[in-house]
């Protein structure tokens, strides 16, 4: 509670009193302004889309203690240079500056995937050695490029071509069924299982899942069919694919997937790719540092872009179904 000294409220005394009140009020405003300007929160999440002309980007955020729960939010930047190199599927860290009338993102840092686990670390080292000994090794497609067609065989022995899914969103990941590490192949497949549940009304009609083995000599259709049953995969909507060694190598190269046999197992990298209805590569995510919810948010963002201009406008206002969009402050 603030106390004022007693004074004569007439004439000169009243003027002094009012002056003190005005000074005190001004002090409160300045203090409040400083408090708002001082509020900064560390944020981490997956980028869903980037709008350079409007200086905004959409992120599927982890929870921000003291500010909001995990959700999808659009953030503004004050300088488009802050969005340089930022693309869908990337994991970023940044500072959210909250002022009284606005908020904005600054100090955006793209988090590169780094793993101390044996498989990805060894695969990366072997890839470098392979590039030195075979400099003509094909490089992965750049984001935004059209993905070339390919044909593999699914768990029901049916030929599956990427081109047959034109007009649909396609999510692709890479596994081998003998993988012994729960955080790698099993986790990636389980993430697709979460997508199958979340988008059950869109599966097959708007969204297709492709899981490609990079161990075709052991992962034939029968082995893949058995593996697919673990996630109750509908073979009409979620295809587990195998093929000849050269065909698997070709598809793996398109997405930068590296794998090397090692005493019955495989040292391998981790990649999950999203292809838009026009057949262009939207994202090629390395590693497993994202959640199933974040990958689902990215898929939903691409699904929203299938529609006309009005739907896309609504998608920008409410980008993801089933995810909170209002901050809890």
Image: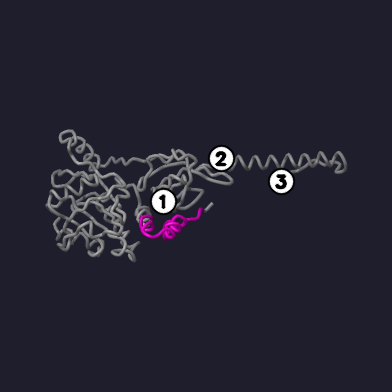
Residue 307 is left or right of residue 325, and the answer is: left
Query: Mark 3 highlights which residue?
Result: 1
Q: Which residues are magenta?
A: 301-327
Q: Which of the two marks, 3 or 1, is nearer to us in this view?
A: 1
Residue 119 is left or right of residue 245, and the answer is: right
Q: CA distance from mark 3 to mark 1?
A: 43 Å
Query: Mark 2 highlights which residue?
Result: 38
Q: Nearer the viewer, residue 294 or 150?
A: 150
Residue at 31% of width from left, 47% of height from top?
A: 144
Residue 34, picture quadrant = top right
Q: Tell me whether the residue at label 2 lies in contact with that at label 3, contact meaning CB atoms closer than 8 angstroms.
A: no
Q: CA distance from mark 1 to mark 2?
A: 24 Å
Local crowd size for mark 1, using a 10 Å CA cut-off: few (<14), some (14–19), many (≥20) = many
Does the segment drawn in magenta span residue 304?
A: yes
Residue lying at the far right of the rendered structure: 11
Query: Mark 1 highlights which residue?
Result: 60
Local crowd size for mark 2, using a 10 Å CA cut-off: few (<14), some (14–19), many (≥20) = few
Q: Position of residue 235 (x, y in %)?
A: 22, 64
Q: Position of residue 24 (x, y in %)?
A: 72, 41
Residue lying at the far front of the rendered structure: 309
User: Circle 3 — which element?
Assistant: loop
Disc assigned to residue 71? none
- Work out whether mark 3 precedes mark 1 in sequence or the reverse, and give the earlier one: 3
Local crowd size for mark 3, using a 10 Å CA cut-off: few (<14), some (14–19), many (≥20) = few
Residue at 63% of width from left, 43% of height from top?
A: 32
Q: Position of residue 123 (x, y in %)?
A: 21, 41
Q: Which of the two marks, 1 or 2, is nearer to us in this view?
A: 1
């Amino acid at each position: 509670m603030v106390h004022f000294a007693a004074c004569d409220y007439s004439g000169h005394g009243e003027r002094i009193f009012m002056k003190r009140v005005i000074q005190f009020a001004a002090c409160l405003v300045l203090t409040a302004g400083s408090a708002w300007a001082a509020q900064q929160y560390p944020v981490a999440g997956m980028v869903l889309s980037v709008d350079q002309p409007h200086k905004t980007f959409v992120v599927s955020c982890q929870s921000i203690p003291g500010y909001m729960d995990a959700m999808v939010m659009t953030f503004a930047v004050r300088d488009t240079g802050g969005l340089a190199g930022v693309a869908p599927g990337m994991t970023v860290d940044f500072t959210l500056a909250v002022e009284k009338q606005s908020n904005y993102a600054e100090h955006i840092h793209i988090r590169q995937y780094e793993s101390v686990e044996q498989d990805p670390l060894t695969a990366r080292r072997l890839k470098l050695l392979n590039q030195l000994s075979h400099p003509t090794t094909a490089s992965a497609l750049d984001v935004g490029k059209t993905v070339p067609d390919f044909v593999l065989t699914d768990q029901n022995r049916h030929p599956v071509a990427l081109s047959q899914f034109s007009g649909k969103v396609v999510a692709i990941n890479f596994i081998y069924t003998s993988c012994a590490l729960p955080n790698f192949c099993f986790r990636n497949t389980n993430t697709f299982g979460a997508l199958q549940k979340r988008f059950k009304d869109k599966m097959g009609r708007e969204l297709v899942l492709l899981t490609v083995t990079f161990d075709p000599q052991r992962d034939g259709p029968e082995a893949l069919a058995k593996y697919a049953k673990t996630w109750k995969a509908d073979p009409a909507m979620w295809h587990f694919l195998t093929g000849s060694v050269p065909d698997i190598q070709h598809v793996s190269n398109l997405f930068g997937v590296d794998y090397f046999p090692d005493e019955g197992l495989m040292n391998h990298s981790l990649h999950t790719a999203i292809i838009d209805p026009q057949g262009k590569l939207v994202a090629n995510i390395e590693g497993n540092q994202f959640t199933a919810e974040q990958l689902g948010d990215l898929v939903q963002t691409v699904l929203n872009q299938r529609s006309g201009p009005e739907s896309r406008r609504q998608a920008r206002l409410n980008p993801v179904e089933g995810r909170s969009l209002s901050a809890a402050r």
